[in-house]
Image (cartoon, rainbow, N blue to C red):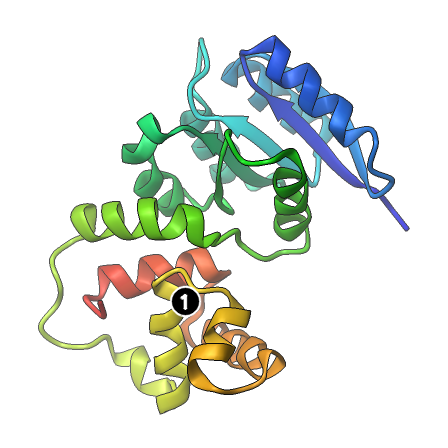
């Protein structure tokens, strides 16, 4: 099994070294580098091409959000996960619009942060209810454009069930939670999510959240 290559960027050396140590205990994760500012993060991501870059939002020289936007605009293929604190809520919508694969609170248990990297690496987006409901819903609802009067034309491509699941995804519910709410199997939900993303031309669940809010579906 090929290990997931991870780059860390955080200006707090104690946190960075501790997180790197945790990564090194995982057989499926490999820390290929760690840096203390956003400018260095961009440079190292372009040089090393890690699978996932974990960036703190607040860093000197270049903040993590600007670094993420820079990297994603250049199409390096690296997926970005941002670390945030409760004081960073206003960055969430901008980060999701840029194409980041999710946010994690720095206060989360290390095991959850490590698992989040795995989620991002396999091509999914981290829509963790503990983050989404408090941050994404609050700020996407406040910062997204006003609801449109007419539904987007491509919404007609979805079945009634797919529309229902799209709204559940936009509310930050996991596949397991959606399955429980709709009384269907989790694999069924996963299949519907895959189909609706394809029909709407969306990359992942994060883009589905943005789509729902920008088109006034919630």
Q: Quadrant of residue 209?
A: bottom left
Secondary element under disc 1, as helix, strand or loop, is: helix
Q: Position of residue 35 (x, y in %)?
A: 63, 15
Q: In the displayed image of the protein, which residue is found farthest to the bottom?
A: 160
Q: Position of residue 184 (x, y in %)?
A: 52, 87
Residue in the picture at 54% in, 28% down: 55
Q: Quadrant of residue 153?
A: bottom left
Q: Quadrant of the C terminus?
A: bottom left
Depth check, front residue: 93 or 88: 88
Above-or-below relation of 190 to 105: below
- Label 1 CA crowd tier, 10 Å (few <14, some 14–19, many 20+): many
Horizontal arrangement in the rendering, residue 101 relative to residue 86 (left or right): right
Above-or-below relation of 112 to 31: below
Residue that label 1 marks: 169
Q: Position of residue 11 (x, y in %)?
A: 54, 12
Residue in the picture at 51% in, 29% down: 106
Q: How many marks?
A: 1
Horizontal arrangement in the rendering, residue 71 relative to residue 46 (left or right): left
Residue in the picture at 37% in, 86% down: 157
Above-or-below relation of 99 to 11: below
Q: Position of residue 90 (x, y in %)?
A: 27, 34
Horizontal arrangement in the rendering, residue 74 relative to residue 43 (left or right): left
Residue in the picture at 35% in, 30% down: 86
Depth check, front residue: 95 or 46: 95
């Amino acid at each position: 099994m090929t290990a997931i290559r991870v780059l860390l960027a955080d200006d707090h050396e104690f946190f960075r070294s501790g997180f790197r140590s945790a990564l090194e205990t995982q057989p499926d994760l490999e820390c290929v580098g760690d840096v203390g500012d956003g400018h260095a993060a961009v440079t190292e991501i372009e040089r090393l091409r890690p699978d996932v870059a974990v960036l703190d939002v607040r860093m000197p020289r270049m903040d993590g959000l600007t670094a993420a936007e820079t990297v994603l605009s250049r199409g390096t293929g690296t997926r970005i996960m941002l670390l945030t604190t409760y004081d960073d809520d206003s960055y969430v919508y901008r980060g999701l619009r840029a194409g980041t694969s999710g946010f994690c609170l720095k206060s989360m248990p290390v095991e959850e942060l490590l698992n989040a990297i795995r989620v991002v690496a396999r091509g999914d987006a981290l829509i963790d209810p503990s983050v989404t409901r408090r941050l994404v819903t609050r700020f996407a609802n406040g910062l997204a454009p006003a609801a449109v009067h007419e539904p987007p034309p491509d919404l007609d491509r979805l079945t009634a069930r797919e529309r229902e699941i799209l709204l559940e995804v936009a509310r930050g519910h996991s596949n397991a939670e959606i399955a429980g709410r709709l009384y269907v199997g989790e694999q069924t939900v996963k299949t519907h999510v895959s189909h609706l993303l394809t029909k709407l031309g969306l990359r992942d669940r994060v883009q589905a959240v943005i789509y729902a809010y920008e088109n006034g579906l919630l």
